[in-house]
Amino acid sequence: MAAEGGGKETNEIKTQFTTREGVYKLLTHSEYSRPNRVPFNSQGSNPVKVSFVNVNDQSGNGDRICFNVGRELYFYIYKGVRKAADLSKPIDKRIYKGTQPTCHDFNPLTATAESVSLLVGFSAGQVQLIDPIKKETSKLFNEERLIDKSRVTCVRWVPGSESLFLVAHSSGSMYLYNMENTCGTTAPHYQLLKQGENYAVHTCKSKSARNPLLRWTVGEGALNEFAFSPDGKFLACASQDGFLRVFGFDAAELHGTMKSYFGGLLCVCWSPDGRYIVAGGEDDLVTVWSFTDCKVIARGHGHKSWVSVVAFDHCTTSVEDGDPPAEFSGSDEDFHEQIHFGAGRDRANSSHSRLSKRNSTDSRPVSVTYRFGSVGQDTQLCLWDLTEDIFFPHLPLSRTRTQTNVMNASSSPATGQTITTVSITTTNSSGTNGKDNVSNSSSSGNPANSLPGSLPRSNSLPHSTNPAVGSTPNSHTGSSCSSSGSSTKGNNIIDSAFITNSVSKFASLSLHDSRKERHEKDHKRNFSMGQISNKSSDKLNQLSSSRTAKAEAAKTLGTTQCPRMEEVPLLEPLVCKKIAHERLTVLIFLEDCLVTACQEGFVCTWARPGKVGLLSSQNNPANSPSGTVV
C-alpha cells in the first residue's frame, strides 16, 4: 500500500501513522536520550543501539532500557506508554575513554530487580560484562586485544545459557566465550575443528579452560550481525560479502545461504516461528528467505538507502483457519509441540503453534500474515506484511482480500468468495526475547507451477511481462536443503568445546560463497556519500576488497541464492514514513509499543493502537505540532 507512504516531504517528520490495526502515535514524553536532550553530533561515532530487559519486579514497572550514544552508555527504568521518561535519574551512566560502545545485550535468564548481566562490545574489540544495577564491572574480555583487535559488531547471550555468549567482529570472526573463563595472557592457539564453503570453526588449544572456546571465521569482510533462531538451535549471519549464512549452531553445519542483490548485508532477523529470515543491507531491499526451502521467496522495496535494522513484530499476527483437513499429507513434519528447548526457553503460544502447522496440508492452509518492520539510513520506517500469496504461489487465489495488504493480487477466477482475514493480536510478555517453537518441515506436494501472472511491482523498478520465468516453488538451482528428518553430519562441536547443549538436526550444505559488485542494469541505486561518510573506514575498504570474486559472484544471480528481480514477488511497504532527521539505527517491537532510535541519540516510543495509556492525559501526539522530537 504505497499510498500510505507519506513522509515524502523534505523535512517533515511524522508523529503518527495508520495501519489496519489503527493509529500508532509517537509519545513525545516517553523519549529517552542524554539527560540534556541535546542532539548528539554523530559524525564518526558508532550507531546508537538499544537493549531491553524485564527484571520482573513487584512494582509492575520491570522494564529496563540501555542505550549507547557516542562514548556514553545509559541505563534507565523504561516506563514505556505508562509514564513520561525521567532523564534526570539514570540508574547508571558510564563514559568511556579511548573506545566507544558499539553493541550490548542483557541476559534475560539471570535478570532480577537487584542484578542484571549486561554485555557491552566496544570499537577497539573488548567486551565488558557489567551490572548497571549494582554498578559493578565484573569482567573485561579481550582486554589486551589478543583475541581480536577489530570492532565488535554484535554480541548476544547464547539462548538458554547463563554463562555462554557469542561475539562478532568486523574482522569476520565470531568467538564463543564462557563468562567463567579467563582470556589468558597470551594470544590463543587454535586447532581446526570444522571447515566448509567459506567458513571454518576452530577450537582453542589450551591445557586449562580459557576463552575463547571457539572461533568461527565466516565469509569475507565484516560479520555485521547475527541472530539466533527462536529455539536457539540455528544461527543466521549477515556478512559484508553480501551473504546470509544459516548454521546449525551446535554442530556448525551450514544449512543454507542467500546472496544480496548487491553490496553487503547489514541486518538479519527470524520470524517468530523460525520459518522465515529477513535480511537487509546495502541494496536498499529487504529480502525474505525461507528456512525450510532454502530460497528467496520475496523482496521488499521501500527504502531509498541502506537498510540498517529489520525486526519481526512478535505481537501482531493475523491467522485465519481454513477448512480442517481430512488427513495429513506426507510431510516430514511431526505434528507435536516440542516444548523442551532447554532452560529459559518459553513454550510457543497458541498463535505460533497454529503457524507451525501451516504447511501440514495440501488442501486449505491456514492463512497467515506476518508483520515485520525495517528502518534505514534514509530516516524512514517501513512496515511490511507477508501473506500466503507469497508462501503458496502455486495455489489458485480462491479468495479476495478485504484487508489492507501489501499484495495487490488478482481476484479469484473461480469462486469470487470473499473472506475477511481476522486480525488476532497475540501477546508475548517477553517482548522480542520470546522463544517459540520451530517446526522445520518442508511443504509437501508442491506442484511446479509458475507464480501468478500478476505480481505486485514497485513503480520504480522494471516490470516483466513474465515474472515467473525460471521460478518455481521447487527450483533449487544449485542448492538443496536437508529435510527435517535428516540427522546431523559430524560430531557436536560444542560438546568438543566442553559445552552441553541441544544437537542440531540438519545436515551440512555447501553453497557458492562470493560477492559481486552491482552490475545489473535493471536495479541501480544512487548512494549518497554524505550519508555514509560517518561509517568506519574499514567498512568502506571492505566494499572494494573482493574484486577477484566478481566472476564467481555472477554465478549466483538467477539461482535460489539470488534470484533476478523479476523472478520473485516484490513487496511494497504497508507503511513508509520519515520519522527522524538522522539515520535510524534501532527498531524493536514490544508488547504495547514499538521503539525506534536515530543517530542523534533520541530513543522514541510509538504506542500501539489503543495503548496510549496514562500519557493520553498528559500529551496528545496526534494534535502535537512538534515533530522536532526525533
Image: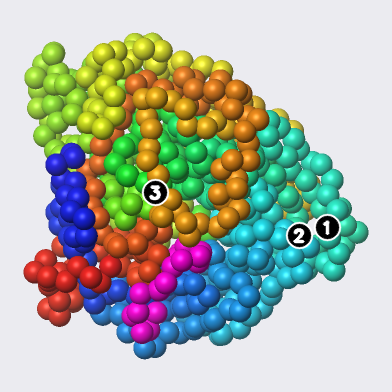
Q: Position of residue 84 (x, y in %)?
A: 26, 80
Residue drawn 86% across and 53% down? Answer: 189
Amino acid at circle 2 = Ile
Q: Would residue 590 be found to the left or right of residue 498 on screen?
A: left
N-term-proximal mark, 2 vs 1: 2
In the picture of the structure, the residue carrying the numbered disc 1 is: 188
Q: Which of pointers 3 and 2 indicates the residue nearer the eye?
A: 3
Outermost residue, right side = 207
Residue 147 shows which numbered tag?
2
Q: Quadrant of the C terminus?
A: bottom left
| Pointers 1 and 3 in contact (C-beta within 8 Å) | no
Q: Is residue 607 visible?
A: no
For label 2, the SS is loop
Q: Would residue 521 be found to the left or right of residue 493 on screen?
A: left
Viewer-closest of 527 and 597? 527
Q: Position of residue 520 (x, y in %)?
A: 43, 25
The stretch of residues the image draws in magenta is: 34-50
Amino acid at circle 3 = Ser
In the picture of the structure, the residue carrying the numbered disc 3 is: 528
Within-10-Å neighbours for mark 3: few <14, some 14–19, many 20+: few
Amino acid at circle 1 = Pro
User: Is 239 placed above or below 198 here?
Assistant: below
Q: Quadrant of the N terminus?
A: top left
Residue drawn 25% across and 37% down? Answer: 572
Residue 471 shows which numbered tag?
none
| Pointers 2 and 1 in contact (C-beta within 8 Å) | yes
N-term-proximal mark, 3 vs 2: 2
For label 3, the SS is loop
Q: Is residue 197 visible?
A: yes
Q: Main secondary structure of the magenta part?
A: loop
Q: Which of pointers 1 and 3 indicates the residue nearer the eye?
A: 3
